[in-house]
Amino acid sequence: MVEDVKRWVRVPVGPDAARWATRGRCRRVLLVIHNVTAATRLVDVLPLFRDDLRVQVLATCTGSSPFQSGVAELLASMGIPVLPWEQALSTPVDLAISASFGGQLGDLKGKLTVLSHGVGYNKKLAAPDAGRRTPDAGRRTPDAVFGLGPEWILTAEGAPIADAMVFSHPEQIDRLAESCPEAVPTAVLAGDPCFDRILAARHHRDRYRRALGVHPGQRLVLLNSTWNPTSLFGDSGSEDVLPLLLPRLTSELPADEYRVAAVLHPNIWHGHGPGQVRLWLDRARRAGLALVDPLEGWRQALIAADVVLGDFGSVSYYAAACGTPVLLGAADPEALGTESPVAAFVRSAPRLDPYRALRPQLDRLLTGHRPLDGPTELTSSVPGRSALLLRGLFYRLIGITEPAAPAVLDPLPLPPYEPPLRTAPLHVLTRTTADGTIAVLRFAEPRYEPDDAEGEGHLAVHLAVHEDTLDPGALESADVILQYGGADDPRFGSPREWAAEVLARYRSASLAAFVTGPRECEVLHRGGLRCRLTSDTAGDPAVHASALLARLHTGPAITASTPTTLTVGTGTRVARVRVTVDREGTARAARPDR
């Protein structure tokens, strides 16, 4: 114990804190963190104490959750004093706020408020000390929901642990009354701050899509999984869907018509390790999958999505509440309370068939989608008002007046720009139609040779490979070799030098294309043609290099004296691409269509 005391914080709390603290008369608010998942909800409400010189915010971790990885880093990033759990239990505070149960919450010295860290209370979870905490163990039922059962929310003497339990909808309070009527007097209806931040940011949808590299005409498919052995990412359900689904997301969906991203529960990241998650998803990432930050980026990705491929977790339910189509790849009714809204949603939501082609299932879902009333209505009965209601509750419990400024949550930050970087080989189908449009379909490492038999015009197939591919053999057989970077990046010499070097090294390649931005690329053809391709719309200019190769196979020669514009079609999107010739060529492609 002596060694533990040596680790205790001395400022702004501690036995001699009055000697060292600059503002020592502050009211104390303690954020009680169980794991990274629960901490995110506390981060949501932390801004409600902004600009108040009367309040000192502290944090602690109960150590009771099995998911401890990532907590220390998150606490450090918050920049507030972190008390060891034993010190937190010994330190009087005016208000403690938790977003989960577990640990000795009832021993904290101060008023306690408990929030939900998901979309209400839905999942079953046996208390680790079940049979010990509550004297009336017979009241526990197999359908008990985490956060609503007496084994979680009552002391051994049968009194509520929390002074206030926050709910987002009256239906949650009704279920509380059935499972633990003793706790009903502590129930407070105060909305869902996480959902409110989503609602407030919906007008930035286009910005979030651009941040993820989604271009006009593309659909964003968001893969989502909660943590659980029977979740979409789990491997102990009736069938392990993930190995079937992952390669098909990037090989069956045309690269220029679909952008694919994944949002995984923090307990997956921190339970198995971020490095392990990246290893598991390496092939998918090289084929174009974006792996979204589970703390700062998932809500923005959810707003940006056209369709969510998910499971029985909160993110899928939030998606449905926003009116976004959801296709369930995993549904475990045994993990949910039968009367919970998420369970009702899981029973009615359409299901993925992992053994059938993916694209037709997505097309049917999007075409026939009708938003469900349940998720929109039951996520929050007071949408947009959680900041007002929560701050009022917090300050009443602290016992001081609220600040005069309006209670507001932080806006969702704009994520960094992360366009897809596909280093997996791309199988490219080009077809020149009667009106001269060059239709292009690109597939990342397809399991089977892609087909476009229904199109009109001459069909050609070639292989486009990023120079940084993991498969050196693919470069030896590539028709087009790609690189991305700044036009003035000294590491490549220049786009011209790079292209000449690549064509000299890989003798089978016909074309080298250096992409310098979302509208431009520099191209060198083995026949000598050197040109710059400039599109009227942002996208991946590598697709225009493939269109140019098709044009050189089938069309008249491209010269500096005759202005040339390519019309390039990818799905429903058509781009006009200007060809600026720096040097004319003397021959066509090094080899014909394969």
Image (cartoon, helix red, strand yellow):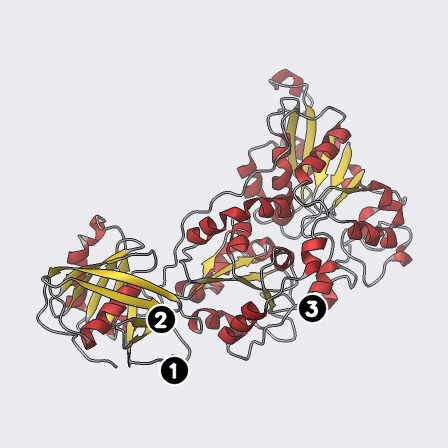
User: Which disc is residue 348 wearing?
Assistant: 3
The image quadrant that residue 178 belongs to is bottom right
Residue type at numbered disc 2 = Arg
Residue 313 image point, x, y percent: 65, 59
What's under tag 1, amino acid-wise? Glu
Q: Residue at x 39, y 55 (%)?
A: 419
Discs 1, 2 touching: Cβ within 8 Å = no
**SS label for mark 3:** helix
User: Is 407 drawn above or below residue 236 in the view shown?
Assistant: above
The image position of residue 495, as x and y in percent, is 19, 56
Which residue carries the number 1 mark? 454
Q: CA distance from mark 2 to mark 3?
A: 35 Å
Give the CA distance from mark 3 to mark 1.
35 Å
Give the farthest residue toward the bottom: 453
In the image, is residue 142 above or below residue 87? Answer: below
The N terminus lies in which quarter of the figure? top right
Name the residue at 74% across, 34% down. Answer: 393
Percent of width and height locating residue 268: 58, 58
Tag 2 or tag 1, which sits nearer the N-term? Answer: 2
| 213 lies left or right of 30 | left
Amino acid on which disc 3 is placed: Ser
Residue beneath disc 2? 442
Which residue appears farthest toward the top when viewing the image?
A: 19
